[in-house]
Image (spheres, rainbow, N blue to C red):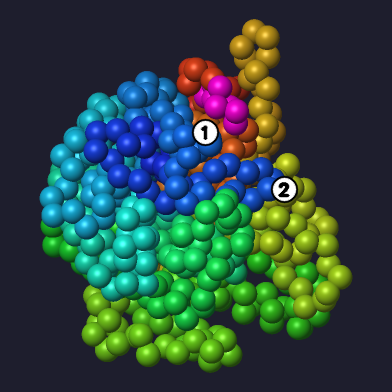
Amino acid sequence: MSFPKDFLWGGAVAANQCEGAYLEDGKGLSVPDMLLGGDVNTPRTFLPKTDETAFYPSHEAIDFYHHYAEDIKLFAEMGFNTFRLSINWGRIFPNGDDEEPNEEGLAFYDRVFDECEKYGIQPLVTLCHYEIPWAIVTKYGGFSNRKVIDLFVKYAVTCFKRYKHKVKYWLTFNEINIACMDEGGIGNLYGLGIMEDEDINADHRIPLTELKSNPQRTFEALHNEFVASALAVKAGHEINPDFVIGNMIAHVTVYPLTPNPKDVLAAFDEDNLKNNFCGDIQVRGEYPKYIFRYFKENGIDPSFITEEDKKILKEGTVDMYTFSYYQSGCVTTGEDAEMTQGNLLKSAKNPYLKASDWGWQIDPDGLRYTIDKLRDRYPHTPLMVVENGFGAFDTVEEDGSIHDPYRIDYFRPHIKAMGEAIDDGAPLIGYTTWGPIDLVSAGTGQYAKRYGFIYVDRHDDGTGDFSRKKKDSFDWYKKVIASNGEDI
Ligand code: BG6
């Protein structure tokens, strides 16, 4: 098992899940600021107007905004040479369409990147990680409005110019394929900033699973996002030809539940729609043929794909393909299969796999399989796993220690699987674990679903003093990085 010498090792966070300071220094509201928490059985709810008495987890999150120096120091101690984070769009353009960017927001990320530089940590920056400014949702209808393409490109160019000497690695949209995940309203709101007026103006809490959606609008908006991403890639390369700009796909690997050819075909189609479609466009620069059958069978009129846009997609292909990988699922045409929960997808339960307390099926072999499939699909494109991790309940012992062998048990075989994929010839250039420090869960809004090597004293009832503590896994990951993946 041989990781390349310059392999990027680190961790990944998103601004809205860690920063807090949700209105500080001129920041505007963004989508997650409107969401309350849930749990494994209760979906998060959208509450149209921020309510003084309700608990919005992103408003304070883990207060990375004021703790970033301490946190980056701990990441450096673990040996990170990369740190994936997102810029909160609403810190830079509080209303999404402001004439001038907000200097205080820009200055915050200067401080963060300078801190990374101090320790030789390369930032890997996502421009949009489920945090579209709220005003873009209400005033423009999110990405269903083509004007938002220009707003995003202006924001991207502002960041590229400002940080061109501090950041080399960029990602445009986090998990751009969430819109195809069959989760209706959640995909629309998180990924595309779309909500129907009726939901925006409701006077009660709405479970995210019940938000309304319209497939024609979804795929048109997703198209606009592809165009925005491609224009940003092109502009980025003009600003600094050394930039490495990637896409980011939620890869939910699927298997047929049985050898029944009907199940095999159903899994094949699902893989294309949910995992391959967006990546094919962003890596190859054109719509894959198979999607037109899906459009036809689902009454989606593809006339929004204009000749001019096709040219833009061709000119704005990405330099690397990055993805999140947590689990796999099974697909079946049978009706009586037992189902299980996933982060973005419900799927049939795989009898060979165990699952986390949130029902996410644990499948390290699936990671090797996924990386190798991507190697064959995009032979000339470097790959990076930019999210992988285990959400679990942790217990702080009386002496303050936190023993999390279950987390190490999750990571160990996944890291081995990456090594095997490298031995298989995959051009894997880096790995950032999800949530190296505990943060707010995107799916449930919980603090209790902890991913970190670093524990944060913050809880779902709003208590906690935000202090940080190392868990056992901290020293373990440090050892893995120090040995470049040999000592696991
Ligand atoms: C990914 C997202 O889908 O999964 C992250 O990019 C998210 O934002 C992560 O936090 C883990 O999901 P969850 O729901 O456990 O936070």
Residue visible at 38% across and 41% down? 15
Residue 262 is situated, as x and y percent measured from the top left of the image, at: 76, 83
Residue 464 is situated, as x and y percent measured from the top left of the image, at: 54, 20
Residue visible at 77% across and 48% down? 354
Q: Answer yes or no: is residue 221 visible.
A: yes
Residue positioned most to the top: 399
**Amino acid of disc 2:** Asn
Q: Secondary structure at mark 1?
A: loop
Q: Which residue is mark 2?
A: 41
- Using the numbered discs, state the Cα–Cα distance from disc 1 to disc 2 in whole angstroms: 23 Å
Please indicate whether residue 313 sits to the left or right of residue 459 in the image: left
| Residue 156 counted in the magenta span | no
Please indicate whether residue 76 sits to the left or right of residue 115 in the image: right
Which dot marks residue 367?
Answer: none
Comparing marks 1 and 2, which lies closer to the viewer?
Answer: 1
Label 2 CB, ligand 1: below 8 Å? no
Q: Secondary structure at mark 2?
A: loop
**Amino acid of disc 1:** Thr
Q: Which residues are magenta?
A: 455-463
Please indicate whether residue 232 sits to the left or right of residue 477 in the image: left
State yes or no: discs 1 and 2 in contact (Cβ < 8 Å). no
Displayed quadrant of residue 207: bottom right
Residue 22 is situated, as x and y percent measured from the top left of the image, at: 36, 37
Residue visible at 23% across and 49% down? 93
Displayed quadrant of residue 211: bottom right
N-terminal label among 1 and 2 = 2
Q: Looking at the picture, tell me which residue is in the foreground, 80 or 163.
A: 163
The quarter of the image holding the C terminus is: top right
Which dot marks residue 53?
Answer: 1
From the viewer's perspective, is residue 451 above or below residue 473?
below
Q: Looking at the picture, tell me which residue is in the foreground, 290 or 438.
A: 438
Q: Of helix, strand and loop, which mostly describes the magenta segment?
A: loop
